[in-house]
Amino acid sequence: MKIVIRARQVRVIVTEPQLPARLARRIADDTGVTLEELDPIETGPLVADAYEKGLRKILQTLVRTLR
């Protein structure tokens, strides 16, 4: 796994809050890759601007992580 991650220059592993992140965390720890969480906006409060706020949060995470 480490060889593939290094050969492909993987910089980040992305998880979702609805799924266990244990394996991803272990791989990130073993390889030094950043671990981030992105919520696909499948859950949360049913308010008018929830979708927009969710997208903004995803965008902020991507911008911060992929710089």
Image: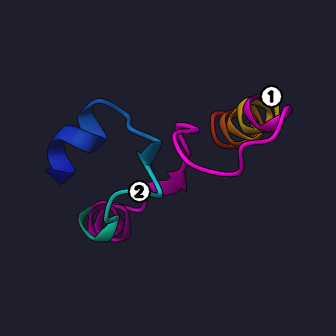
Q: Is residue 39 magenta?
A: yes
Query: Does 31 sit left or right of 50 as displayed?
Result: left
Q: Amino acid at mark 2?
A: Gln
Q: x, y percentage for residue 29?
A: 36, 71
Q: Are marks 1 and 2 in contact (CB under 8 Å)?
A: no
Label disc, if present, on residue 18 of the rendered structure: 2
Q: Which residue does the numbered mark 1 point to in the structure image?
A: 52
Give residue 22's position: percent from left, percent from top. 29, 71
Splitting the image into 4 quarters, where does residue 31 fall? bottom left
Range of residues picked out in magenta? 24-51
33 w.r.t. 8: above or below = below
- Secondary structure beneath label 1: helix
**Which SS class for mark 2?**
loop
Say which residue appears at 56% left-offset and 45% top-offset: 39
Q: Nearer the viewer, residue 18 or 23?
A: 18
Q: Say whether residue 6 is left or right of residue 15.
A: left
What's the coloring here?
A: rainbow
Q: Quadrant of residue 58?
A: top right
Q: Position of residue 46 (x, y in %)?
A: 72, 43
Q: Spot the residue most to the right.
A: 49
Pick the front one: 29 or 18? 18
